[in-house]
Amino acid sequence: MAAAATPCSRNNVRIISYNSAQRERLAAPAPAASSAKPKIKESKNAKISPPSGTFICYCLITSMLKYIAYCRKSTDESQRQVLSIDAQIAELKECAATHKLKIVETITEAKTAKSPGRMQFEQMLKKIEKGEANAILSWHPDRLARNSIDGGKIIYLLDIGQLLDLKFPSF
């Protein structure tokens, strides 16, 4: 897509948006003689609301992202071969080093995620809402949520722009 070629500013997030017609033109094979490009709207204000039907690409600088490393081992998964918390931490540190990610805190929890009410998970979400972090690094998506309420909280934080990235080295 043409949006990937647009340079990013180091100090902010640029939003590049395409409406649905422009997206279809970008997805279709371009004629050999045509060099027409769709009009691209850019904004340095990440809080704008795009028009309905608009696809948004975020160009993020990884140095802007502050990750919370979240590790969870369920109490009811003792028979399953899920990585131990120590093994998850080691893998997340390796992933962070490889991708040059900034981990501001590591949160661990030993509780099932089948029902809401995990204290450490709620603490992590509050830190994101306060702006202390804006990204989550976890071993697998199922370490974050296995119920619709917790999953919905993650989606809501993504929707409002307080959570900017989710990384899962095993997924």
Image (spheres, rainbow, N blue to C red):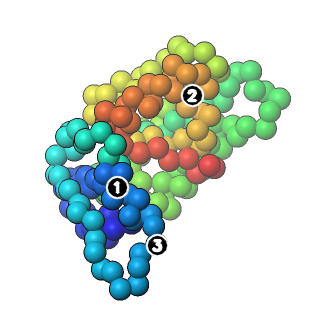
Q: Residue at x 78, y 27 (%)?
A: 78
* Residue closest to the eye, 163 or 160: 160
Residue situated furthest bottom in the rendering: 33
Between circles 2 and 3, the one closer to the viewer is 3
Q: Earlier in the sequence, mark 2 or mark 3?
A: 3
* Residue closest to the eye, 54 or 68: 54
Mark 2–mark 1 distance (CA, rounded to whole Å): 35 Å
Mark 3 lies on a secondary structure that is loop
Q: Earlier in the sequence, mark 2 or mark 1?
A: 1
- x, y percentage for residue 4? 35, 66
Vertical placement of residue 129 versus 106, above or below: above
Mark 1–mark 3 distance (CA, rounded to whole Å): 14 Å
Residue indicated by mark 1: 21
Residue situated furthest right in the rendering: 79
Mark 2 lies on a secondary structure that is loop
Q: Amino acid at mark 3?
A: Pro
Residue 101 shown left or right of residue 14 in the figure? right
The tag on residue 29 is 3
Between circles 2 and 1, the one closer to the viewer is 1
Query: How many residues crowd mark 3 within 10 Å: few (<14), some (14–19), many (20+)?
Result: few
The tag on residue 135 is none
Q: Amino acid at mark 1?
A: Ala
Q: Quadrant of residue 81?
A: top right
Quarter of the figure with the N terminus: bottom left
Residue 167 shown left or right of residue 140 in the figure? left
Q: Residue at x 54, y 41 (%)?
A: 138
Vertical placement of residue 59 versus 30, above or below: above
